[in-house]
Amino acid sequence: MTVKFTKMQGLGNDYIYVCAKNVPENIEELSIKLSDRHFGIGSDGMIWILPSDKADFAMRIFNADGSEAKMCGNGIRCVGKYVFDKGYTDKTELEIETLSGIKTLSLKTENGKVSSVSVGMGRAEVSADKEISVCGKTVLCTPVSMGNPHAVIFTEDADNAPLTTLGAAIEKHETFPGGVNVEFVTVISDTELRMRVWERGSGITMACGTGACASAAAAVSKGFCKPDEDIAVKLDGGTLHIKISKNADVTMNGPAEFIYEGETME
């Protein structure tokens, strides 16, 4: 099948965006094929922008391995820019239906184009720390749900975190039957975190919006950061600004950018 697409990125977390009435039946195969960085377009996955009878638009997210994700913080910001800049809406306050619920977007515009997007991510659910045995060692992690699962690991050196070994092993650990996103986090100050991520279904990515939110929520729950204050989460692809309320409601702010457009061939 021929697919008209737009390549977009939020802090280097890049996806192939398609606006359509529905998702094709061969979506798993298609996402794997087009996400391949050598034989396809190359991306962390595909995001389909669809009609919704519950919100302004719906989004469905398919990882590079073909699996479906419930939510993507960087992706939803790009959806907001896509629908506004392309004229599908003139609203700067939007609701987007996702598999983890309806999320609210506030679009900041400059010269008629979206420059940044603030997302009401819902409430973070921070669970008690878990010790898991993996790769011959015991690892302490903080499970956090942002509508999708995260395992946050605080470390003194996130820059050199063992993403491909420990991250990959924890993703598929029996403690997390459906798989999990794994964040390695260093606390720089009470307003700044450094985070690297191994994403479920995609591996190492430049940024993970829900992961940044989960990391900030875990940091607030442990007293490393303060509620109701801006927390700068520094990722490989740039910085996201996260605020965690005293009730654990999460707001994320960051950029979204177009890269190019194209059409696949049969």
Image (spheres, grey):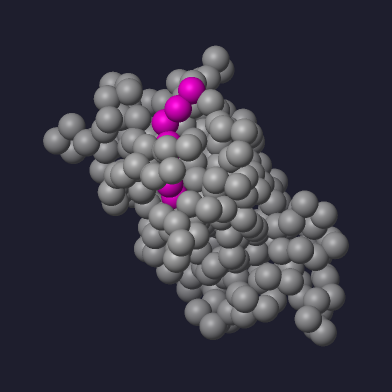
> Relative to residue 93, is residue 208 depicted above or below?
below
* Image point (50%, 79%), residue name: 159
Does residue 50 belong to the magenta stretch?
no
Q: Residue at x 46, y 61 (%)?
A: 39
Q: Is residue 199 above or below residue 60?
A: below
Q: Please say whether residue 19 is one of the residues in the magenta stretch.
A: yes
Q: How many marks?
A: 0
Residue stretch in magenta: 15-21
- The answer to whether residue 21 is above or below residue 72 is above
Left or right of 217? Residue 265 is left
Residue, x 55% and y 36% (percent of image)?
60
User: On the rendered structure, is 234 left or right of 204?
Assistant: left
- Looking at the picture, tell me which residue is in the foreground, 72 or 139: 72
Task: Please provide percent x and percent y for residue 226.
Answer: 53, 56
Asked whether residue 222 is in view, the answer is no
Most extreme residue toward the left is 111
Q: Name the image quarter holding residue 30.
A: top right
Question: Residue 31: x percent and y percent?
Answer: 54, 48
Q: Is residue 253 left or right of residue 171?
A: left
Q: Quadrant of the C terminus?
A: top left
Q: Nearer the viewer, residue 265 or 210?
A: 265
- Asked whether residue 202 appears in the rendered view, the answer is yes
Residue furthest to the top in view is: 53
**Which residue appears at 56% of the width and 32% of the height?**
24
x, y (%) of residue 25? 62, 33
Q: Nearer the viewer, residue 130 or 244?
A: 130
- Tell me which secondary structure the magenta stretch mostly adopts: strand
